[in-house]
Image: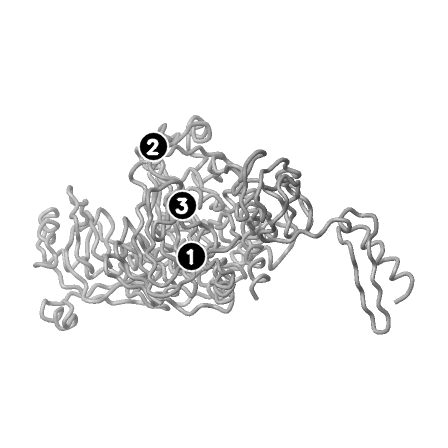
Amino acid sequence: MSITVLRPGMLTTLQDRGRQGYQKYGVLVSGAMDEEALRLGNIIIGNEQGEAALEITMMGPVLKFTEDALISLTGADLEPRVDGNAVPMWRPIVLKSGSVLRFGRPVRGSRTYVCLSGGYDVPLVMGSKSTYLRAAMGGYQGRALAADDVLEAGRMSDCGRAIMESLKRRGNFITSPWYVQPAYELEQGADGPIRLTPGLQYRYFTEESCQKLVHEGFAITVHADRMGYRMKGSKLELTAPLEMISEAAVKGTVQVPADGNAIILMADRQSTAGYPKIGQVVLADMGRLAQSKPGEVIHFSMITPAQAEVLYIEREEYIDQIALSIQCRYE
Amino acid sequence: MDIKDVEALIKLLEGSSLTELKVRDKDFSVTLVRSNTSALARPTAVPGAVKVAGGEEKEITAPMVGTFYSAPTPKGEPFVAVGDTVDVDSIVCVLEAMKVFTEVPADLHGTITEILVTDGEFVEFGQPLFRIKVS
Amino acid sequence: MVTYTITPLGEAALFVSFGHVISPHIHRYVRILSEYLDRHRFVGFKECILSYTAVTVIYDPFFVKRNIGLDKTAAEIVEDMLRQAVENMDKKPLAPADIVEIPVCYGGEYGPDLEYVASYHDMTTTEVVKIHSNTEYLVYMIGFCPGFPYMGGLDERIATPRRKSPRLSIPARSVGIAGEQTGVYPLATPGGWQIIGRAAVELFTPVRDTPSLLKAGDKIHFIPIDIDTYKEIRGDSV
């Protein structure tokens, strides 16, 4: 089974959970911006959680499937359609041979994941299929998809085959009567503040700035991409100039250059950063943040690292439960 | 199996929503049937299109155990409201079990007259969820 | 006795800092801890990021807690482990630093700013090359882009400010000076460094075990070579 790219879309790249273990060589982690959507999308079609998927940004590609294929669509609602019919998200779907998958406008969120049962057959580069655009490595030939590209599918797992069989048996042939939801839709509300823990240099910022951080809104500017989201709002200021030497940066680091406008570091961030850090986005909220678009106004709230750890573990347990649930059903 | 085991089985049956319990041991077999339940007097729900006389009130029951939700997502519009007309294939609610949400089709054609459970309520297999005036 | 602090960097990383001054002495601790963690990978350990004076230990709280299961938070569990590792630091062996020789073709088309650096310091280009290549540099960390070394030890006699207008693209393997820093660009990238030469070897190849030519702790010698030798080493891929 292979997929032909008829139109590449705005920015479509293969991403898995990232290239882990090489940051001390300056190799970025990259990986899916909304990891939860990637993982759930894989689980429901019998893949390993961390299998690579196509990350589609805002304007989607046009993809043609050469044979019957079991896929799932998770993350943002970019109006996916096959032959004019709306395709449901967050559940396994069997597309018939020759189907053409298209996308419309971004209704909600900004990044959709097209997970394929069996995964995409591209070489692992340093243990990962994620695309590191700047270094032109990994994913599909180290770049975003272009017209006429052909993606080959990998081998489906037994679980994936069982899901596909069950859908075909139902006569329904298209999709299942069941679906999953990301935890960030179910808890607290998608409109809640993005939670932060204090950054390494939090105490060097003015009291006023720390207050503004959690009481005012900050808009995502147009300079928001896989490397980082540049924010705009009240200026965040240090009490006194700080001699900074380059330090480590992790996903969700909120750093503040001299102009006072925060930058939130995302999947393609460099591993070292030299600006003062006011906060860290809680990992459980990174998926929600990754789905936000330029122009949206974000509110923050501050919690402790211990509280953030509890949220992290709860999120992992949630995903684990879904994996177990699917396993029990189809194995 | 001795009398204590049978007592335990009776308690098990009483405490559940089951109507019948059959247990077989090496040289012993027992069948317990609940009496005086409306479940016995009524034919079990059969999915699929069934022709019935118009105007009859029926119930849409839960095809599995789970948590009842009236809308597809926490902020979504409910699938149906009282007064809505539904088809055999219309989705009326979802039941969540082990974090997976399963759509429940009406399996009947008619008008919703009453919603019998609330959002977030845990429901048993066979529990009535909606009252529907069949057409 | 080692002085250090351990601070959370979010809920999935701990920042172990040995001070605020860039010095080879503090850097030794960075290397010792990093090598120790690589050899004794605890359940849930993901990787370390090294910086001038600190080691950032990245882990998965879910796997840490699941494995140990105490009443403590994962952060507390990992912090305890790190304290134990650091307390025993002075007793830990450190392998002697690798000395890496990097052949560089200085000047000409590969070093368009060499003349400028020379004139800025009222020297000849030969003198600049001599000073640059006679120094032994310490690699403090790799960051900014794959394989890029943050090197210390540039002789202040040739320290030169960055270009006023950065170039849109600097060829890969360019050797440059920016203020008191010197380094080599592994990949083509925009930048404002004064480019004085080009290395004949790759600093980065995307392979599993040793993707980066250099690592934190290495000592670097630049070896001047002429353009013919450069072309010979590069072969087809000049």
Is residue C184 at all visible to an observer of this figure?
no
- Closer to viewer: mark 3 or mark 1: 3
* Quarter of the N terminus of chain A within the rendering: bottom left
Q: Amino acid at mark 1?
A: Arg
**Neighbours of disc 3 within 10 Å: few (<14), some (14-19), many (20+):** many
Which circle's residue, 2 or 1, is located before the other in the chain? 1
Q: Secondary structure at mark 1?
A: loop
* Residue A127 visible in the displayed image: yes
Q: CA distance from mark 3 to mark 1?
A: 18 Å
Q: Which mark is residue A76?
A: 3
- Secondary structure of the residue carrying numbered label 3: strand
Measure how far apart labels 2 and 1 are at the Cα level.
Answer: 29 Å
Chain ID at mark 2: A
Q: Are marks 2 and 3 in contact (CB under 8 Å)?
A: no
Q: Is residue C103 left or right of residue A298?
A: left
Residue type of the residue flagged with mark 3: Ala
Q: Foreground residue, A10 or A166?
A: A166
The numbered mark, 3 or 1, whose residue comes first in the sequence reads: 1
Q: Which residue has dot 2 on it?
A: A232
Classed neighbour count for the residue bearing mark 1: other residues with Cα under 10 Å, few (<14), some (14–19), many (≥20): many
Q: Is the C-beta separation of discs 2 and 1 under 8 Å? A: no
Q: Identify the residue under disc 1.
A: A17
Q: Is residue A223 left or right of residue C115?
A: right
Q: Is the residue A15 above or below the residue A124 in the image? A: above
The amino acid sitting under disc 2 is Lys
Query: Residue C225: x, y in percent?
Result: 14, 67
The location of residue A249, given as percent across then percent down, is: 39, 48
